[in-house]
Image (cartoon, rainbow, N blue to C red):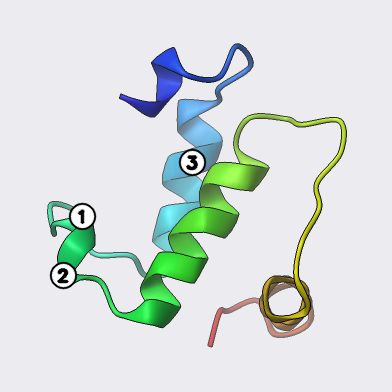
Amino acid sequence: MISGVYKNWDTDKFTEYCNKFNLTKGKCIKDFSRGMKMKLSIAVALSHHAKLLILDSASIEEIILFMVKGEAS
């Protein structure tokens, strides 16, 4: 579904981020917690190889935590 929206969509990267962020496969997005929705947004943003990402401070914090600890909060 998302791959049709982004020209440079990388399904493998998206799957990798979803696994790293522990996003439940097969669960409806409407049932995700606020934090899970933010992680999903980050996974989408990073999976289409954008030239520029504009992130809020909460998203940046989540990415930094992931990079430092190797896991998402």
In percent of width and height, residue 36 lies at 38, 73
Q: In which quarter of the image is the N terminus?
A: top left
Q: Which mark, by number, is residue 11?
A: none
Query: Which residue in the structure is indicated by mark 1?
Result: 25
Dot 2 lies on which element? Answer: helix
Kindly state the secondary structure of the residue where label 1 is placed: loop
Q: Quadrant of residue 57?
A: bottom right
Comparing marks 1 and 2, which lies closer to the viewer?
A: 2
Which residue in the structure is indicated by mark 3? Answer: 14
Query: In percent of the image, x 79 and y 81: which residue is there?
Result: 68
Foreground disc of the pair 3, 2: 2
The kind of residue tagged 2 is: Asp
Residue plotted at (40% across, 67% down): 37
User: Alpha-carbon distance for marks 3 and 1?
Assistant: 12 Å
Q: What count of labels does the image hold?
A: 3
Give the residue displayed 20% in from the left and 55% down from the top: 25
Decide if residue 64 is on the left or right side of residue 9: right
C-alpha distance separating marks 1 and 2 = 12 Å
Q: Is residue 3 left or right of residue 28?
A: right
Task: Tell me whether the residue at label 3 lies in contact with that at label 2, contact meaning CB atoms closer than 8 angstroms.
Answer: no
Q: Is residue 22 above or below residue 25?
A: below
Residue lying at the far right in this picture: please name it. 52
Q: What residue type is labelled 3?
A: Phe
* Disc 3/disc 2 C-alpha distance (Å): 19 Å
Residue indicated by mark 2: 31
